[in-house]
Amino acid sequence: MKKKIIISLIFFYTLSINHLFSQVEHTLVQHPVYQFLEYAYTKGILENFSLSTLPLQRREIQEALKVIRLNDSSLSETDKKTLSLFEKEFELSNRQNSAIFLSKSDSNQLLFSRIFSDDEKYIYRYSDSSNAVSLIPLGSIENINKINYRSEFDKVLLGNLGFRLNGTIDNSLGYGLQVTNGVVLAGTRNLAIEESKITRNIKFVLLNSDFDFSESHVRYSNDWFHFIFSRETRLIGSGLRQKLIISDNAPPMDGISLGARFSTFEYRYYHFKLIAQPDSNIPVGAFTDIPPKYFVLQKFTFKPSWGDLSYFHSIVYSGRELELAYLNPLSFLKSVEHALRDRDKTTMGLDFNINLFRNFQISGTWMLEDIIISRIGTGFWSNKTAWNIALKYSLPFSADIGIEYTRIEPYMFTHFNVQNNRTNDGYLFGTYLYPNSDETALQLRWFWGNRYPLIFSFIYQRHGNNIYDENGNIIRNVGGDPFYVRLPKDSETVVFLDGDRSNSLSFSINAGYEILRGFNIQGLYLLRLTNDQPEYLLKIYFRFGDF
């Protein structure tokens, strides 16, 4: 009798939230729920699951949160508090919604009494069993302060406004659009340019204007199959901090994706348009000459109960329009590249997350570009690899700790055709580490019951750069720059970290607190020593929304 009651409760619970699984749109990678899912994954709660490719659909996150709730005996009371916040946000528990423009499903007026409530806040929202649409305001005030080794003080105040549109049509077509526009309200403009995202904004850096960003996606899902047309930030790869395959280091890529998803297996195919280096000295405007450049990626992911394991294969090609051979999603890219006269850059490798036992995980990514087997161990320049390995442990007091080592061999990411290097608009689109570099990172995250964990990080980086004269002309190429290919005059043998050596040691604290639903304050303190020269950075953000 007891068993029948439990089954009935599960059935009615599933029935009551069935409409939630119509939400096939993506949840952006900036959302803090991903950190909580990583924490649960390390604890061994999420079986047949993978976080090596982000973003996820909203319904995938709902499924994961439900699994975590079913295994909440592994969670502390503090963990359960954080879980409850995300369950409420992702509509797995009761919540109140308020909007400026009302609909049949949402008739609570946001203005003005509910602005400072814990309601979910919208410009407009509507949902039923098959369709959903929401329009959310975004805004932030960001204060950045910097002191360099000369004790020179700099500061800048930035303002951002925008919106996010999300929705699903007929349980199968998901879409999302995010648009923001920002300006310097006060302070030093050059300090704003040092921000990793703003420095990639041509409008701000080269046209001396404001800065704007836009991401969007349209996704069709039908049972196991999906097709995506998007321009959005993606994170692909495994580890602690590093995403070697695709990260947010470069601007988002425009492209198409299709794939298949089953309980223990996923296949994904991507074909992206990249921005190559201009062929002229005109970097922006109507007369800028930018050759075509594309990136193709295949990824096969197996999801057993003990983790996930992926094989990936990619091509970068340029100087011609879409290559029909690379549009076939099930071809073996390396063989096809050979058949097309060996003009393009191929990369292959593995990424993995393995739960060796409960609360302990080993993860990493290994990438290979070229290799001469007979020359392994000789320092031959063409044996190019990049890899990272991380150990993570979930502590009993609502925290996890991890250590990661990343190594990028000399000449990695380069190609004889400089346009075929692994960059988008001049930035590496995987790791931020240049070739001939390594990094050791230690990270502690404390999930103290809010949406945002408290994060302590220690990072030690080493890099061997090419050697240049006072005019910027290269004297010796040691494989330390993805934009300098190896020439016949350069040595065939490389020494890791050879060249103009730089070391960097940094300590940072990231913290955030949701004051009330939607409104949050974030902070970052960074101390960095580069070749023993200190630099201090303090950032404070007051935001509505995560973006």
Image (spheres, grey):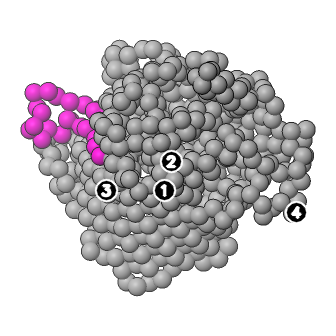
Query: Residue at point 44% right, 46% down?
Result: 39
Q: Which mark is residue 94?
A: none
The three-letter amino acid code for the residue at tag 2 is Phe
Q: Are marks 1 and 2 in contact (CB under 8 Å)?
A: yes
The span picked out in magenta is 366-391
Callout 4: SS: loop
Q: Quadrant of residue 347?
A: top left
Task: Pinpoint residue 199: horizontal percent, then vertical percent.
Answer: 52, 59
Q: Which mark is residue 112?
A: 4
Label 2 or label 3, whichever comes before in sequence order: 2
Q: Quadrant of the N terminus?
A: top right
Name the residue beneath numbered marker 1: 447
Name the residue beneath numbered marker 3: 441
The three-letter amino acid code for the residue at tag 3 is Ala
> Going by the image, does 6 lie left or right of 181?
left
Above or below, comparing residue 389 to residue 456 in the picture: above
Q: What's the distance in space between the residues labelled 1 and 2, CA to CA?
A: 8 Å
Above or below, comparing residue 423 to residue 460 in the picture: above
The three-letter amino acid code for the residue at tag 4 is Phe
Q: What's the distance in space between the residues labelled 1 and 3, CA to CA?
A: 19 Å
